[in-house]
Image: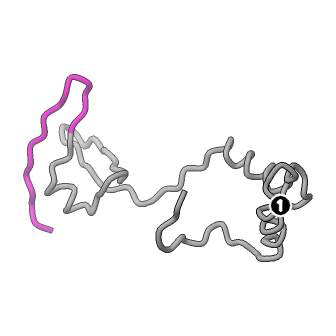
Amino acid sequence: MSTIHEVATLTSKGQITLPKPIRQALGLDFGGKVAFDLLGSQVVVSRVENQEHKDPAIAGFLSLLEQDIQTGQHLTNLPEGLVRSMLAALKNPVDLDEEIVGDVAL
């Protein structure tokens, strides 16, 4: 790997913007994560590989939601067609670790 030397200015809040050549060399884009390692008087910046954040509150909510769906509880206030499709979807196994391909509408 070739040497890249860039200078960034520290803001009053202690923030910097990684210069574009550094971001490109590390393959970083919006939302990318970096790690900082202090080695003597030098700081080494490296890209952090995807580390999935597990939020226990979300996991608990999804567990309760899954139980409700499996038992058919609390689904009466939803549109009838949606309830039917949700209940029908229970027959299809879901791999929660499967990568999502393509765009997702929210």
Q: Residue 3: where, in percent of width, then height?
A: 9, 60
The extreme bottom residue here reads 92
Which residue is depicted at the point 13% across and 34% down? 9
Which residue is depicted at the point 37% across and 51% down? 31
Q: Is residue 7 magenta?
A: yes
Q: Which quarter of the figure has residue 43?
A: top left
Q: Is residue 70 above or below residue 58?
A: below
Amino acid type, callout 1: Glu
Out of 16 and 100, give the one closest to the viewer: 100
Q: How is the image coloured?
A: one colour
Which residue is depicted at the point 20% across and 42% down? 17
Task: Please tell me whether the stretch drawn in magenta is mainly helix, strand or loop.
Answer: loop
Q: Which residues are magenta?
A: 1-16
Q: Is residue 4 left or right of residue 22?
A: left
- In the rendered view of the protein, which quadrant contains the C terminus? bottom right
Q: Is residue 77 above or below residue 101?
A: above
Query: Which element type, helix, strand or loop, lies under badge 1?
Result: helix
Which residue is depicted at the point 80% across and 53% down? 78
Out of 35 and 29, give the one closest to the viewer: 29
Out of 44 and 77, give the one closest to the viewer: 77
Q: Residue 100: where, in percent of width, then height?
A: 54, 70
Q: Residue under label 1, please give it.
A: 80
Disc 1: CA contacts within 10 A as few (<14), some (14-19) or many (>=20): few
Q: Which quarter of the figure has residue 8?
A: top left
- In the rendered view of the protein, which quadrant contains the N terminus? bottom left
